[in-house]
Image (cartoon, helix red, strand yellow):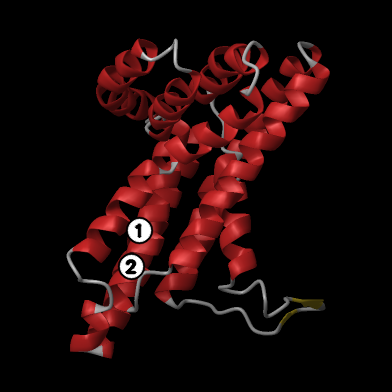
Amino acid sequence: MFDLFNQISSMLSGPIHGLAYGYEHMPVLFAFFLGLVGAVAPCQLTSNISAITIYGNKSLVEKVPWIHILLFILGKIVVFSALGIIIWQLGEEVHSALSQMFPILRKTIGPLLIIIGLFMIGLFRFNKSLGMIKIPDRIKDSYTGSFLLGVSFTLAFCPTMFVLFILTLMPVVLTTSYGVILPSIFGVGTSLPLLLVIFLIWYFGVSGAILKKSKKIGAITQKVAGVLILLIGIFDTLTYWS
């Protein structure tokens, strides 16, 4: 399965990768296009498809949740910026520690998607309390939740993302006077597919179109999106846990 992800990633990233290196002398554009390559890396492919499904479904059923989307992207930017600062401060010794940590974090994405899919289908719901642990209302389907979702999806590193961010981008960060902003630009680049889909939904005026026609259709659409997220989560889990 991972070989299939690699084949899809190679097909999508090839032209963008060449474009990125064409702008190597312009660090900001280089970081952005490198992030776009990262968006179709095997480990980010399922995360981006899932984010598009989640926020695309919300846009069609209700309205474009711009604040949620921006907070999701902010979560990605914060992670990439924090990693950039850590590597800049600690240097080469941090590479081996990160290479051991990311594969473990990557394995959490599949189960997380399964939980999100089951929740969207309606097989279970979060109440104010779960056992003895109270879940704050501000986290459940909230701005905080969107931010944390962006953080968790971004931590899904794989060898491709490790090479792109750690081995390719960071040397440019360390040798550029304004290199501190480049990890953030990289994060925006990884979010471009999501932004493009949501922009098209907004531009063609179809946000909330399903809700205007029928709430029942909206509920069915959410369940279909939930099934898709569930299947992606199962597929992702089988890929990275095998």
Q: Position of residue 140 (x, y in %)?
A: 61, 74
Label 1: which secondary element: helix
Q: Quadrant of residue 212?
A: bottom left
For badge 1, the amino acid type reads Thr
Q: Position of residue 24 (x, y in %)?
A: 43, 12
Q: What residue would you read off at disc 1?
A: 53
For image coordinates 57% across by 36% down, the residue present is 184
For badge 2, the amino acid type reads Asn
Q: What residue would you read off at disc 2?
A: 57
Closer-to-camera residue (60/158): 60
Q: Position of residue 96 (x, y in %)?
A: 74, 16
Q: Is residue 41 left or right of residue 200?
A: right
Q: Is residue 97 visible?
A: no
For image coordinates 35% across by 58% down, the residue present is 53
Q: CA distance from mark 1 to mark 2?
A: 6 Å
Q: Position of residue 132 (x, y in %)?
A: 82, 78
